[in-house]
């Protein structure tokens, strides 16, 4: 077994305020969301990436698998005593397979995974977001699960140095909690992001390995196209993976999924010829390109942090705790 998964709760997380992990109902506020362990359904074989990316992923897996040897038998803990678990970061353009890879890493290590997204743990109630972060790690400890933080830049962004408002205190508290939980957790944590530049330096230091995902090159797109046109999908004779690979330069794997689903939807609604034609696919490729150019994404640091008083039972903002860990 590569890593020890301590079952004891970290100090400060067992204060009973977390309740039974009731699902967030979106209106009451102050509830802790349920973090449900899932069994990975996708394996490394499902990840179609350029060789250079695959090699990086394999080296991260080797690091996870040899963690015990490195840090216990070879006593690297002597020089790095606070690194109990393994935190890794998958970054790169949207739709390139980072979330898929995170699930595949859990699969490869024989663990369930808990997917935590920012919307799930961010609470407008002061003090609740740190509690939600702790609850996610507690759930992972109980299930011996890999924790996946998707779109992690919102969580790992720079801590605010000029704290003037309670809202800013709340953001700093969340990051301080995140740092502390990372130090205590002795399992595997996988962060994914499209915006790695937003990470605070304290987090960058704690992350053992960073893997850059890239848009697929021609050869990778060819493999992706072969993978994404199931045998059962009725296709016209002109549908050709090589043509599609050439036509889809600049698109990510996630885009190709959308192209295939959209083209198949057109075909299924066409009584005259109920099969996917090359022109259906190339039209959808063009549509993805157009949407890319026209629909801009605002950077995540444009996010507005709202502040509202906590409901009864939620501790008031413990101003001043931010920056205690770095
Ligand atoms: N490299 C890839 N190999 C295989 N499928 C991919 C790949 N990239 C994307 N996909 C497909 O697109 C979907 C979305 O990709 P995802 O892993 O969510 O991308 P990201 O997390 O990088 O934004 C995946 O569930 C998968 O079906
Ligand atoms: Mg993702």
Image (spheres, helix red, strand yellow):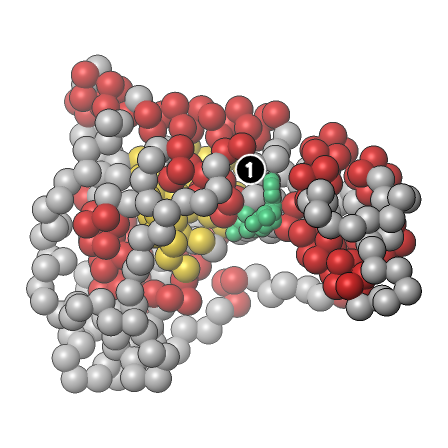
Q: Residue, x 61% and y 25% (percent of image)?
A: 51
Residue 97: in sight, yes or no? yes
Tell me if residue 89 comes above or below residue 276 in the rendering: above
Percent x, y of residue 69: 24, 18
Q: Quadrant of residue 275?
A: bottom right
Where does label 1 land, which residue?
A: 46
Q: Residues within 10 Å of mark 1 (few under 14, many from 20)?
A: some
Q: Residue, x 74% and y 55% (percent of image)?
A: 259
Q: Quadrant of residue 115?
A: bottom left
Q: Is residue 35 left or right of residue 272?
A: left
Q: Quadrant of residue 245?
A: top right
Q: Quadrant of the N terminus?
A: top left
Q: Is residue 130 left or right of residue 236?
A: left
Q: Residue, x 23% and y 48% (percent of image)?
A: 143
Tell me if residue 287 comes above or below residue 101 in the rendering: below
Badge count: 1
Residue 281: in sight, yes or no? no
Ligand 1 within 8 Å, label 1 CB: yes
Q: Nearer the viewer, residue 154 or 218?
A: 218
Percent x, y of residue 86: 31, 35
Q: Is residue 185 left or right of residue 96?
A: left
Q: Secondary structure at mark 1?
A: helix
Q: Residue, x 71% and y 66% (percent of image)?
A: 295
User: Given the current orientation, which residue lies at the most extreme top position?
Assistant: 74
């Amino acid at each position: 077994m590569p890593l020890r998964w301590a079952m004891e709760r970290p100090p400060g997380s067992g204060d009973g305020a977390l309740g039974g992990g009731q699902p967030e109902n979106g209106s009451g506020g102050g509830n802790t969301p349920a973090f449900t362990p899932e069994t990975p359904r996708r394996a490394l074989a499902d990840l179609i990436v350029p060789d250079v990316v695959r090699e990086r992923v394999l080296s991260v897996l080797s690091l996870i698998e040899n963690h015990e040897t490195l840090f216990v038998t070879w006593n690297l803990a002597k020089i790095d005593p606070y690194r109990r678990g393994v935190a890794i970061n998958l970054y790169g353009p949207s739709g390139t397979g980072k979330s898929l890879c995170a699930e595949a890493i859990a699969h490869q290590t024989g663990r369930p995974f808990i997917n935590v997204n920012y919307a799930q743990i961010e609470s407008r109630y002061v003090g609740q977001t740190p509690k939600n972060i702790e609850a996610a790690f507690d759930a992972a400890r109980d299930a011996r699960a890999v924790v996946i933080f998707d779109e992690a830049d919102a969580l790992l962004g720079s801590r605010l140095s000029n704290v003037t408002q309670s809202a800013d205190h709340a953001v700093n508290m969340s990051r301080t909690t995140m740092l502390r939980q990372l130090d205590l957790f002795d399992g595997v944590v996988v962060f994914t992001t499209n915006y790695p530049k937003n990470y605070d330096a304290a987090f960058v230091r704690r992350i053992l390995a960073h893997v850059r995902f890239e848009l697929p090159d021609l050869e990778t797109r060819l493999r992706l196209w072969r993978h994404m046109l199931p045998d059962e999908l009725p296709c016209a004779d002109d549908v050709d993976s090589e043509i599609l690979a050439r036509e889809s330069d600049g698109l990510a794997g996630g885009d190709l999924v959308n192209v295939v689903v959209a083209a198949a939807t057109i075909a299924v609604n066409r009584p005259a010829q109920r099969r996917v034609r090359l022109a259906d696919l190339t039209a959808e490729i063009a549509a993805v390109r157009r949407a890319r150019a026209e629909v801009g994404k605002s950077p995540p640091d444009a996010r507005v942090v709202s502040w509202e008083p906590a409901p009864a039972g939620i501790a008031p903002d413990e101003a001043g705790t931010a920056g205690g860990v770095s």
